[in-house]
Amino acid sequence: MITPLPHEKGFHVSWDQIHRDARALAWRLDKRGPGPDGSWRAVIAITRGGMAPAMIVARELDIRMVDTISVKSYNHQTQAEPVVLNRPDDALMGDGEGVLVVDDLVDTGKTLEVVRQLYPKAHFATVYAKPKGEPLVDTFITGVSQDTWIFFPWDMALQYVEPYRGKD
Ligand SMILES: O=P(O)(O)OC[C@H]1O[C@H](OP(=O)(O)OP(=O)(O)O)[C@H](O)[C@@H]1O
Ligand SMILES: Nc1nc2[nH]cnc2c(=O)[nH]1
Ligand SMILES: [Mg+2]
């Protein structure tokens, strides 16, 4: 078990924001693949957080070959060693050349490290990146400080909040 780091700040991402940021990621990756026309062979989502961004990237870049690699690292905010629970066929993946691997974020980089070992020639893209994980990611959109916990819309619900005057 790895000791959890304190997260002093929260960065709350709405559906609208993740949609915009995942689109920006797709546009940045457009025509940057190793295909003759700059295309990518496939999009691989790192589940579960990478699934929504990977879907948006695949849609924007018109890539129909989409698969998943299942990696579990965190239980809520507590980190453990990443475990690969399921992965695509080796026939599709090879060494990863021409494949876009997408995740919602890179934090310590442990998850990407494990997937990179499996597919060293793949291109690794995340929507958000914390400083420790930046060396592990090839393309990302927004940098977030290490002491921030990112809250995604699929982990949240709208809630009643007391009026400001009603507190104390
Ligand atoms: O860079 P790291 O420190 O390894 O952390 C990043 C990973 O942690 C989260 O996944 P998590 O294991 O919580 O699973 P989930 O995607 O199913 O929520 C996130 O979606 C990344 O995949
Ligand atoms: N939702 C979420 N999952 C994570 N896994 C590692 N870091 C984070 C984070 O900041 N937010
Ligand atoms: Mg994840």
Image (tube, rainbow, N blue to C red):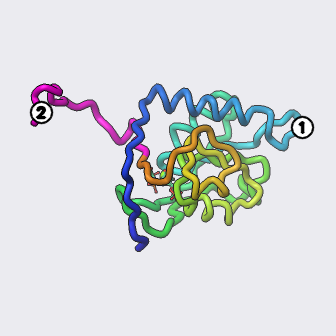
> Measuring 50% from the left and 62% from the top, which residue is drawn there?
85
Q: Position of residue 29 (x, y in %)?
A: 72, 36
Mark 1: amino acid: Pro
Residue that numbered label 1 is attached to: 36
**Closer to the camera, 130 or 27?**
130
> What amino acid type is highlighted by mark number 2?
Lys
Q: Are marks 2 and 1 in contact (CB under 8 Å)?
A: no
Task: Give the quadrant of the N terminus.
Answer: bottom left
Horizontal placement of 129 versus 150: left or right? Answer: right
| Left or right: 58 as drawn, with respect to 84 | right
Residue 22: image x %, image y %?
A: 58, 33
Q: Nearer the viewer, mark 2 or mark 1?
A: 2
Query: Which range is magenta?
Result: 150-168
Numbered-mark total: 2
Going from N to C along the chain, the mark reached first, 2 or 1, is 1
Report how far apart the C-alphas of labels 2 and 1 lie in the structure: 62 Å
Residue 93: quadrant of the picture: bottom right
Instruction: Using the image, determine if residue 62 lies above or below residue 131.
Output: above
Q: Dot 2: few (<14), some (14–19), or many (≥20) neighbours within 10 Å?
A: few
Q: Residue furthest bottom?
A: 1
Q: Secondary structure at mark 2?
A: loop
Mark 1 secondary-structure assignment: loop
Q: Which mark is residue 167?
A: 2
Q: Position of residue 81 (x, y in %)?
A: 48, 69
